[in-house]
Image (cartoon, grey):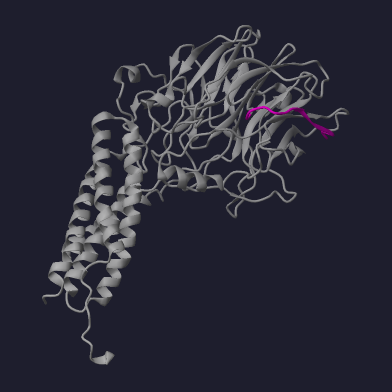
Amino acid sequence: MKTTLTLSALTTALLLSACGDGSQTATQAHGADPKLPEPQRGLLPSMTIADPAGWDGDKPTVPEGYRISAIATDLQIPRQTLVLPNGDILVAEGRGGNAPKLKPKDVIAGYIKAKGTTSVKSGNRLTLLRDADGDGRYELNQVFAKDLNAPYGLAFHDGALYVANQDALVRFDYQEGQTEASGPPVKVTDLPSEINHHWTKALTVSPDGRFLYVGIGSNSNITERGMEAEVDRAMIWQIDAETGAHRPYATGVRNPTALAIQPGSDQLWAVANERDELGPDLVPDYLTSVQDGGFYGWPYSYWGQNVDDRVRPQKPDLVASAIKPDYALGSHVAALGLDFSEPAMGERFADGVFIGEHGSWNRENPVGYKVVFVRFENGRPSGEPVDFVTGFRSEDGKTRGRPVGVTVDPRGALIVADDLSNTIWRVTPAR
Amino acid sequence: MTATTPHVYRSTPNPLHATLLAGTVPLFLGALLSDIAYFRSYQIQWSNFSSWLIAGGLVFCGLALLFALAGLVRAAHEKGRALLYLALLLATWVLGFVNALEHAKDAWATMPLGLVLSVIVTLLACAATWVGLGQARAGGAA
């Protein structure tokens, strides 16, 4: 009997240690040199899953001097958007991934996490929105292309419209003013799609149109599906637009969810989502300029040389070469959207990037669930991120929307895709 | 008539109870062996096997617990032994559950605590089965 008592006391202690992070706050380390705590993980990962509720005519909050309106609703899971030269907006809609459930954990966690997302069926299509008279109302809303496979990344260069499906990069020929694709797309190249734990394929095109950059996320949180599943994963590919030939441009990027080219410097930038289950303030999601041939740590280390002990075998040589990202956005914020601003966005937000943060699950005190602006100085991020669109989580703990892609319309508007309320929001300076 | 019939104490676990109880041993032992294989090879599939074997062990162990509880309530003579059996089985289940949570961590994060717990749970399952099935012999005498 005594043994039993000791054992149950031990169990109680273990269970108590699982509910450990009450001291955390909503503020996190940001910027170039974030202070990182020691990794921690109780018996249960801390989780706060979004509890969806409708907007009921309400709207997200924008800074003084800006207006926001919904320009399209009832979409089929909008993720990323693209502003075409004539001002038309294309929306990629869908849900991907076909990762099998390998452990009892996958069954349970999958069920819980699904509660924080939309129940709408995957659109697998592109929708075109048009505001012909420039009154801010996008009166034309029609399907541009359908029968795609979880389209996500979008890019346009000189008559070629590129779409990154979850399994292939495809191209449509586009003529200005077109409201519907003239035919099925041409495949540029296949993309890694086995398992597709992280299925989103981020996309951008080089300014000269020669190369496409595709972000390919890892096939696990931290190699729990085995190293064999990680071939051609957690990297950014450079693809020749003409031939479809590819090479890894940067590796060790756990989940590069959005890519953008910096105007002027033509430098490639990315936002990436880092690993979970190391505590509420690890590991920061980041914004970084992407170095050709650079290795960014995953899975062996994070934020430079911080070794992740959950990976076996370890690779000390590779860890030594890992690059520190440029700018920490905060842990678990789930950055999914990135675009460089334009002077037309107004003086305060003219030089920098907008970042869509889908919001956390692996944290007791939720973070993200907003669009932030990171100011640039001399071509580099500087200072703290500033809130740009907020109010996606209301004070009663309900979540009314979750931002994904953000796109700057050079005419002076920020387009935000919201994949929980299936809405496209448009933020403009009030003139 | 019925009032004077001596109370029949059923000391032998019925076949279902016995199957559930004895089944915990190979399930938890299988998990232990899978853990050892993962520990030595870093091959993640062993860790997946281990997680499911532990889940199976918890189902068998949990159902056997219900029988053990009923056995304790009905036990006329060997209260002490029935209580010991229940306690061992309960400890097996509780630590088995903790082990299941430990195995829900990603990749090598399950190690080494997952392996240590698997050893303890397997030993507890063996002890519970020994005491549980041993009741047959000790039962009638006292």
Residue A167 is situated, as x and y percent measured from the top left of the image, at 58, 24
- Residue A183 among magenta residues: no
* Quarter occupied by the N terminus of chain A: bottom left
Q: Is residue A15 above or below residue A84?
A: below
Left/right of residue A93 with respect to residue A108 in the rendered view: right
Name the residue at 25% across, 73% down. B72
Bounds of the magenta span? Answer: A137-150
Q: Which of the 4 image quarters holds residue A76?
A: top right
Is A309 or B80 nearer to us in this picture?
A: B80
Residue B61 is situated, as x and y percent measured from the top left of the image, at 30, 57
Looking at the image, which residue sits at the far right?
A: A133
Q: Is residue A298 visible?
A: no
Residue B71 is situated, as x and y percent measured from the top left of the image, at 26, 71
Q: Which of the 4 image quarters holds residue A431?
A: top right
Looking at the image, which residue sits at the far left?
A: B141
Is B108 or A319 nearer to us in this picture?
A: B108
Q: Is residue B118 visible?
A: yes
Is A147 or A72 nearer to us in this picture?
A: A147
Numbered-mark total: 0
Name the residue at 58% across, 33% down. A96
Left/right of residue A336 with respect to residue B21 in the rendered view: right
Left/right of residue A81 with respect to residue A99 in the rendered view: right
Q: Which of the 4 image quarters holds residue A301?
A: top left
- Residue A146 among magenta residues: yes
Residue A165 is situated, as x and y percent measured from the top left of the image, at 62, 24
Is B100 or A255 nearer to us in this picture?
A: B100
Q: Is residue A38 above or below residue A399?
A: above
